[in-house]
Image (cartoon, rainbow, N blue to C red):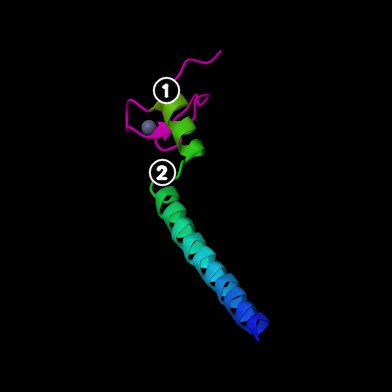
Amino acid sequence: MDDEDLEDSVSFLSIAAIVILLIVGVVVGSKRAIQSLPSKPKPIERETFETGVFCPYCGTRNTEYAIYCTKCGKKIREQG
Ligand SMILES: [Zn+2]
Protein backbone atom coordinates (compact mmCIF):
# COMPACT_ATOMS: atom_id res chain seq x y z
CA MET A 1 0.00 0.00 0.00
CA ASP A 2 2.80 2.38 0.94
CA ASP A 3 4.74 1.25 -2.12
CA GLU A 4 2.00 2.51 -4.45
CA ASP A 5 2.06 5.95 -2.87
CA LEU A 6 5.83 6.09 -3.22
CA GLU A 7 5.71 5.12 -6.88
CA ASP A 8 3.10 7.79 -7.61
CA SER A 9 5.16 10.54 -5.99
CA VAL A 10 8.34 9.39 -7.74
CA SER A 11 6.71 9.36 -11.17
CA PHE A 12 5.18 12.79 -10.51
CA LEU A 13 8.56 14.19 -9.46
CA SER A 14 10.29 12.78 -12.53
CA ILE A 15 7.62 14.24 -14.83
CA ALA A 16 7.86 17.60 -13.08
CA ALA A 17 11.64 17.54 -13.41
CA ILE A 18 11.40 16.78 -17.14
CA VAL A 19 8.89 19.62 -17.63
CA ILE A 20 11.13 22.07 -15.75
CA LEU A 21 14.15 21.00 -17.79
CA LEU A 22 12.19 21.50 -21.01
CA ILE A 23 11.05 24.99 -19.96
CA VAL A 24 14.57 26.00 -18.91
CA GLY A 25 15.97 24.65 -22.16
CA VAL A 26 13.45 26.58 -24.26
CA VAL A 27 14.09 29.82 -22.35
CA VAL A 28 17.87 29.52 -22.59
CA GLY A 29 17.67 28.52 -26.24
CA SER A 30 15.47 31.49 -27.16
CA LYS A 31 17.75 33.89 -25.26
CA ARG A 32 20.77 32.59 -27.17
CA ALA A 33 18.92 32.90 -30.48
CA ILE A 34 17.98 36.52 -29.73
CA GLN A 35 21.51 37.43 -28.67
CA SER A 36 23.11 35.85 -31.74
CA LEU A 37 20.89 37.70 -34.22
CA PRO A 38 22.11 41.35 -34.03
CA SER A 39 25.82 40.56 -33.74
CA LYS A 40 26.00 38.45 -36.88
CA PRO A 41 29.45 39.07 -38.37
CA LYS A 42 30.03 39.68 -42.07
CA PRO A 43 33.77 38.98 -42.44
CA ILE A 44 33.83 39.11 -46.25
CA GLU A 45 32.24 42.56 -46.50
CA ARG A 46 34.43 43.95 -43.72
CA GLU A 47 37.58 42.62 -45.37
CA THR A 48 36.62 44.20 -48.68
CA PHE A 49 35.90 47.50 -46.94
CA GLU A 50 39.21 47.59 -45.08
CA THR A 51 41.42 46.53 -47.99
CA GLY A 52 39.41 47.98 -50.87
CA VAL A 53 40.26 51.03 -52.96
CA PHE A 54 37.71 53.74 -53.69
CA CYS A 55 37.63 55.17 -57.19
CA PRO A 56 38.39 58.92 -56.99
CA TYR A 57 36.27 59.55 -60.10
CA CYS A 58 32.99 57.80 -59.31
CA GLY A 59 33.46 56.57 -55.74
CA THR A 60 32.97 52.91 -56.51
CA ARG A 61 34.64 50.55 -54.11
CA ASN A 62 37.05 48.22 -55.87
CA THR A 63 39.15 45.32 -54.64
CA GLU A 64 42.58 45.94 -53.14
CA TYR A 65 44.46 44.87 -56.26
CA ALA A 66 42.22 46.60 -58.79
CA ILE A 67 44.10 48.78 -61.28
CA TYR A 68 41.08 50.03 -63.19
CA CYS A 69 37.70 50.94 -61.69
CA THR A 70 35.12 48.25 -62.26
CA LYS A 71 32.40 50.85 -62.90
CA CYS A 72 33.89 53.74 -64.88
CA GLY A 73 37.08 51.99 -66.10
CA LYS A 74 39.45 54.81 -65.05
CA LYS A 75 42.88 54.05 -63.69
CA ILE A 76 42.78 54.16 -59.90
CA ARG A 77 46.18 52.67 -59.15
CA GLU A 78 49.62 52.66 -60.71
CA GLN A 79 50.59 49.38 -62.25
CA GLY A 80 53.44 47.39 -60.70
ZN1 LIG B 1 35.20 54.71 -61.05
- Magenta highlight: main SS: loop
Q: Quadrant of the N terminus?
A: bottom right
Where disc 2 sits, the SS reads: loop
Q: Residue at x 37, y 28 (%)?
A: 55
Residue 12 magenta-highlighted:
no
Which residue is label 2 attached to? 39
Mark 1 residue's CB less than 8 Å from ligand 1: yes
Considering the numbered disc 1 on the image, is that residue within a helix, a strand or a loop? Answer: loop
Residue occupying image coordinates x 62% and y 77%: 6
The residue type indicated by label 2 comes to Ser
Q: Is residue 38 left or right of residue 25?
A: left
Q: Amino acid type of disc 1?
A: Ile
Q: Which residues are magenta?
A: 55-80
The image quarter containing residue 75 is top left
The answer to whether residue 41 is above or below residue 62 is below
Question: Which residue carries the number 1 mark?
Answer: 76
Quadrant for ligand 1 reads top left
Q: Residues within 10 Å of mark 1 (few under 14, many from 20)?
A: some
**Of residues 62 and 70, which is closer to you in this image?**
62
Q: Quadrant of residue 69?
A: top left
Q: Quadrant of residue 62?
A: top left
Q: CA distance from mark 2 to mark 1?
A: 34 Å
Residue 33, x across and y down, in percent: 45, 55
